[in-house]
Image (tube, coloured by chain):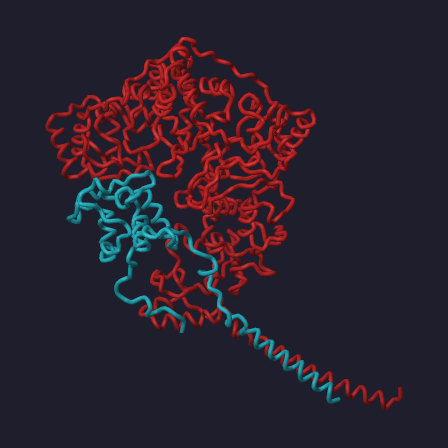
Chain colours: A red, B cyan
Amino acid sequence: MPAEDMGKLSEKLRLTFAVSTVVCVLALAISPLKDLRAEWKHYKRWFVKYAQTRPDTKKLLADYTPGIDQVWLPGMNVTDRCTTCHQGITQAGLADASVPQPFRAHPPVPHNVRQWGCTVCHRGQGPATEVAEAHETTLAWEQPILPAHFLQASCGSCHQSDLKESPQLARGRELLTHLNCQGCHKLNNLDRPTLGPDLSSVGYKVTREWIYKWLKEPRTVLDKDGNVTVNGYENEPEPRMPKFRLSEDELKALSGFLSVQKAKPIEKYKINPAVVAAWSKKPDLISQGEVRFRQMMCTTCHSLAVTRAGETKMIGGDIGPELTKVGSKVNDEWLVAWLRDPKSYLEHSNMPRYGWSDEDLYKVSQYVMNTLTDSDLLANVPKLGAASEEEISTGKRLFAEKGCASCHALNGIPPQKEFGPDLTAQGSKNASELEFGKAKIDHNLVSYIQAKLRDPLSVNPAARMPQYNWEQADLDAVTTALLSQTGPAATSALQHLVVTRRETSFQALGAFAEVYERFKCYACHRFNGYGGKLAPDLSFEGSRAQQKWIADFLKNPQTIRPTLILRMPQFNMSDKDASIAAEYFSIAVQNPNVDPQSVGARQFTPAMVFLGKQLYEVKYQCQSCHTIGATGGYVGPNLNNAGNWLTPAWIEAWLRNPQALQPDTIEPRRNFTEEEIRALTAYLLTLRTGTKPLTAAPAIAERGAGR
Amino acid sequence: MKPRLSVVAVLFGGVLCSSMLGGCRKSAGEVKPTDAFGTYDTEPDWNDNTRLMHLGYQESQGKRVFYQYCVWCHADATPAGPSNRSNVTPTPPLMNDGEKLNGESGEYLQNIITLGGSALGKSAMMPPYGKTLSADEITSVIAFTRAIAQPAYQKPGRPGSQYAGKP
């Protein structure tokens, strides 16, 4: 190339270079300008304008700075710039709903923003300064803000014990325990789950056809009007047994395998032939059986479908399985053996062992086998016959493969460790760690958890997880509980704040231990935080009730709250068992703050009784909640027999401060003077009208079927 | 020479525009976190069960307290079945009865729950809850009452609309 051309070219180049330099410098000079229009500045300016329209302008703008505000808590790993836009968050004057967001004040909560920041509870991106980046999932910022509906999940990250303020979280944790999610998944901060039935001898209990049907469709169907169509299994909207997607061959193999499980022969019991002979000719055997079934309050734990005015409803409790069609399910010899001694078939059963007489046992079992039936129950099940060797071996393999052993004990098949994924840190996962498959859902953690729970196949066609059937409220509760599983605390300061879950236990001792275990008191009652929630907490029963009353009550329970539908079962308890229990309660199940000696010697005078009656009826109008005679309310217990029922020391302590004895009682604590307390106690102790038993107490069969 | 210059001009203009637009990108489309992230809790309308009322934190705490302590006498149906309302004279108002309760100030309601009916010259059948519930819990019950009131509760004094809306 000639030299002059070179010069020409370089001149062009130089010119281009000069121009582009100017462009770059200009661009660089302009780019800071765009910061002037940053999103957060818009909110800063708006807040000033907004504050000027209010009468309390000066107060609102007292801490105003034009820059970015942040709450910085290095110990907790919190750098929250949320207050840059949410400028009124601690201004009590901006609490009203008419205040536009983002300026509204935070409602009063136990943790304040200045000490805790925002992201500890709400999650989201603390350091972000744009609305979308702070609240939503974007490419660079992965933790979205937690929707308010699931906010209780954040409580659960630190509060491993249940709080009364977070009922949704508590319900979710209860469901995770109830459904034994821990059988397959690793989860933290939960109670020990209750397992499904032991299947080692299931071949004696039900037929192969029934197992086939149960595996195929293990749930009660609710139609669109909320009516229950009973399939003869369970009454809860969410039965514990989920639906596994099994092919016809798998159903045949598994039902075949289970039908040959006969590890421990049932103990056959021959009901006294004289009883059978006497009753089998009487036509009202079945109706008598039903009467006994109801008198014994079987429906406190078991429900039955009842049709009234064309509408089918479940009536009864949900501690045990629903029994509407159980007569078409179980073998009659098994039923008799089970009723006599549930523990001989199922070690961990919550079913108490009743004190049966041969007559009762015969009547009730005949009622169950003849009336609680449905001839169509197994109508769509093919005739299966005896299982072949091949079916049994395939069934055994499937039992392990499908994870059945995680909930059901079966001889020779141990549960697999870590069968499902570890979920202890599921609640802090980023969206990029989740597999959404072809599901058309929002790509965030909440949608993922809900889609997976609702239909496990929707996000992963190869999922082994079975299908559960959720009510929306329970689905949200379980989602909340899973979101609370955020793994170890992010910083040691947070770890220090964790409130650990309290392990509860109650050890009954001596002769009472056997009575306690036989009648399964803990299935409904609570002792020192351990046990069921259906019936009154008995942690201090020995301080509350008189020993004689306890013994009489156990032999023939009469409800003191007449509106309750679920009542204490009639166990046919012997005098000996009742006195062992009453004695144990009076000696060992005591509240240290209720001293029986404090009132024992004191004399209650008629004048005090008169004053107490006046106080009860006029000044404090206790009859709004309590019944004496035939009038009064039924929020609190009936007090007609208070004098025989309650101990004087308990009445006084209770009137002084009910919540000190039973923290969740709704009886309000009043401003009684000591004189008033003594007068009311004197009055209540004069009330000694026992309610008459509904039926004469049946002769207790010491040597009968119940041993 | 000419085409090169025009390329440079286009580039320059582009950079300028994008830098300016970058600044005002977000202020065009507002995100309202309250809409996007829902409310804390809901309560079905007592009179129309297809309708759900949205509750904030305080109101939902009030709902919890209500269903534990107040529901027995201040509602016609309770979690345990029958209501005690008919056993009490004079009949207590339903908790969502706006016609009766909207006219009462928050201070008055706070007092009657804390001190009981007899302290305010009303029926002694309303017991005092000041030693059983905390002041915050009582405030939250009132907030819940306001949220479910039928007809809807209007805050007295300054009309809400005066300060609403953006400049």
The foreground one among A515 and A326 is A326
Residue A5 visible in rendering: yes
Query: Which residue appears farthest toward the right when viewing the image?
Result: A1
Residue A500 visible in rendering: no
In the image, residue A109 lies at what x, y percent?
A: 39, 52
Q: Quadrant of the N terminus of chain A?
A: bottom right
Q: Quadrant of the C terminus of chain A?
A: top left
Q: Vertically, is A306 above or below A516?
A: below
In the image, residue A215 lies at what x, y percent?
A: 57, 34
Q: Vertically, is A558 above or below B113?
A: above
The foreground one among B82 and A270 is A270
The foreground one among A177 and A67 is A177
Left or right? Give the position of A394 relative to A244: right
Left or right? Give the position of B138 relative to A315: left
User: Quadrant of residue A186 in the image?
Assistant: top right
In the image, residue A431 lies at what x, y percent?
A: 59, 54
Left or right? Give the position of A694 relative to A407: left
The foreground one among A37 and A195 is A195
- Identify the residue at horizontal 66%, vertical 26% (top origin): A392
